[in-house]
Image (cartoon, rainbow, N blue to C red):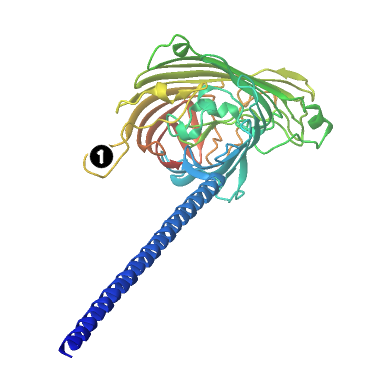
Amino acid sequence: MKRMAAGRSGLAALLGLVMIATGTRAAAHDDADSVRSLQEAVDALSKEVELLKEQAVEQKERAAASQQKTDAQSPAANWREGVQFNDPRGGWSLRLFGRGQLDYRQFEPGAAASTFGIRRARLGANMSFLKDYGLTVEGEYATGSASGAATQSAAITNAYMDFNLFDKARVRAGQFKPQFGLENTASANFSDFQERSLTQNLIQNLNYDRGIMVHGAPYKGVNYGVTISNGTGLNLEERQLSRQDVDADGKMLTARLTANFAQMLEVPDSVVHLGGSYKTGKAANSQANPYTAATGQTEGRGVVFFNPEAFASATVAGSNVDRTFSVAELALTHRSWKLQGEYWQVRYEGERSTAPATPYDPRIDSGYLSLLWLTTGERYADAYSNGIFARIRPRNNFSKEEGGGWGAFEVGLRYSFFDASDFLDSTSGNSNTGRVSTTGTGATASTPTKEADAWTLGLKWMPNAYSRLMLNYIVTRFDTQIVANGYSMDEEKSLTLRAQVDF
C-alpha cells in the first residue's frame, strides 16, 4: 500500500511537472506572438510615418513651386530713375516719375516782385513693351502767373511714342522737346544754374513742339537728332483762322549733331564736346494774330528788358515770317572741372505788305560761357551721355549717421549776353518791320533796351542724386537805362533759391 501510495504521489508530481512545463511553453509561445505582433505594429506605424513625411515634403515642394510660379507672374517693383514695375518675363515695364521745384526770387531794385513760386511740378509715366516700343505722358501742374491770375491747372509737356527698332535711328512721335542746343536739350532737373542763360529767351515757346524725330548714335561718340514739327510750340497745333494761317503750315526743321572726341579717342575722365544745332520754319503772321520776335527777360526771371514790336498789327499787314535759328556748342571737362559755352542766333525775315512795303531781316545774338567745379570730386564725364549732361551722383550721399557723407557740392560762374541791336529804335523806320516797342507795362519795360549782359554766381548742394538746393546771385546790366514798373534802372540784382526733388 505504501508502495502504491508512493507511486501515486510520484505520478502526481510527474503530472504536475508536465503541466508546469506545458504551461511555461504555452506562456512563452504567447509572449513570442505578442512581440511579433508589436513589432509588426511598430513597422506598420513607421511606414505610415515615413509616408506622411514624404507627403509633407511633396506638399511643401508643390507649395514652393506654386509660389514661385505666382512670383514669376507678378510684376517686380524697384527704384531706377523713378518707381519701376517690371514684367519678370521681359514683356513690359512701367516707370512713374516726377519733379518738384520751389523757387524764391528777390530783386533790387524792386521792379519785379520778390516772391515764392512753383517753377515746375510734374508727374508722368513711361510704359515700354515688347522691348522696342514706348509711350510717355507727362503733365505740368504748376499754376500762377506774373499777373497774379491763376493759369490752367494742368497741361501736357510730353506726350509721345518711341519706336526703337534700330539703335542708330530711333523714332519719336508726338509732343516732345526737339534736340536743340546743349543747355536747352538737357533736362531742367540737371541744369548747371537755377535758370538757363539769356540764350533761352530766343527759343520762345518752341521748347516743346508736336512732330516726329529720328535720333541715335551712329558712331562711337557721335549723336544726332532730326525733327520735323509744326513750329507752333507747346500744346499748339496749326492755326486755321485765315488763309494766311493755312499758308504758314509748312513744317519746322530742327537738326542737331554732336561729337565727343574724348570718347572717340578714349581719353579717361574727360569730355570734349563740339556740336551744332539748326532750326528753320515759317511763323503765321496775320493782322488778327501778329507774330512777335523773342523778348528778353533777365536770368532771375525779373524784368523784361527787350520788348519788340509785332511784325503786323490791326492797321498794318505783313507776310508770314521765316525764322532761322543756329547754335554752336562747346563743352570741355576733366574730372571735376567743366567749361561750357554756346553761341545762339535767330533771324526773322519777312515783308511789311501795307504801303510803304518794306522788307526786314533783323536778328538777335546771344551766348554764354560758364566754369563749374565739383568741389567734392565727382566727375562730369560720368554724367555725360548721348550728347548731353545728366544726373550728378554724389560719391557719398548725405547722412546724419556718424561718419556719414555730405553729398556733392558745386560752385559755378557764368557770363551771358543778349544782343538785339539789329532791331530798330521805336522811332526809326516803318512800324512792324523789326522795331522795339514802348508799350510795355508792369515788369515789361516801357523804355526797353536792346542789349544786356549778366554775371551769375551759383552754389549747389546735392545731398543725393535726386535732390538739390541751389543759390544764385545774378547781376544783369543793361546797355541803356530802362523803365519798368516806374523804376528807372541800368542794372538788376537778384538773389534766387531753389529746393528740388525729382524721381
Residue sitting at the far bottom: 1
Percent x, y of residue 256: 59, 19
Percent x, y of residue 15: 26, 80
Residue sitting at the far right: 243
Crowd class of label 1 (few under 14; some 14 to 19; many from 20; radius 10 Å): few
**What residue is at 56 percent from the left and 22 percent from the top?**
420
Q: Is residue 321 above or below residue 219?
A: below
Q: List the residue tagged with mark 1.
A: 404
**What residue is at 28 percent from the left and 37 percent from the top?**
406
Amino acid tagged 1: Gly
Q: Is residue 495 left or right of residue 364?
A: left
Quadrant of res 40: bottom left
**What residue is at 73 percent from the left and 30 percent from the top?**
312
From this viewpoint, is residue 429 visible? no
Residue sitting at the far left: 2
Percent x, y of residue 26: 32, 73
Q: Is residue 404 above or below residue 309?
A: below
Question: Which sits in the foreground, 413 or 19?
Answer: 19
Question: Which sits in the foreground, 34 or 223?
Answer: 34
Label 1's element?
Answer: loop
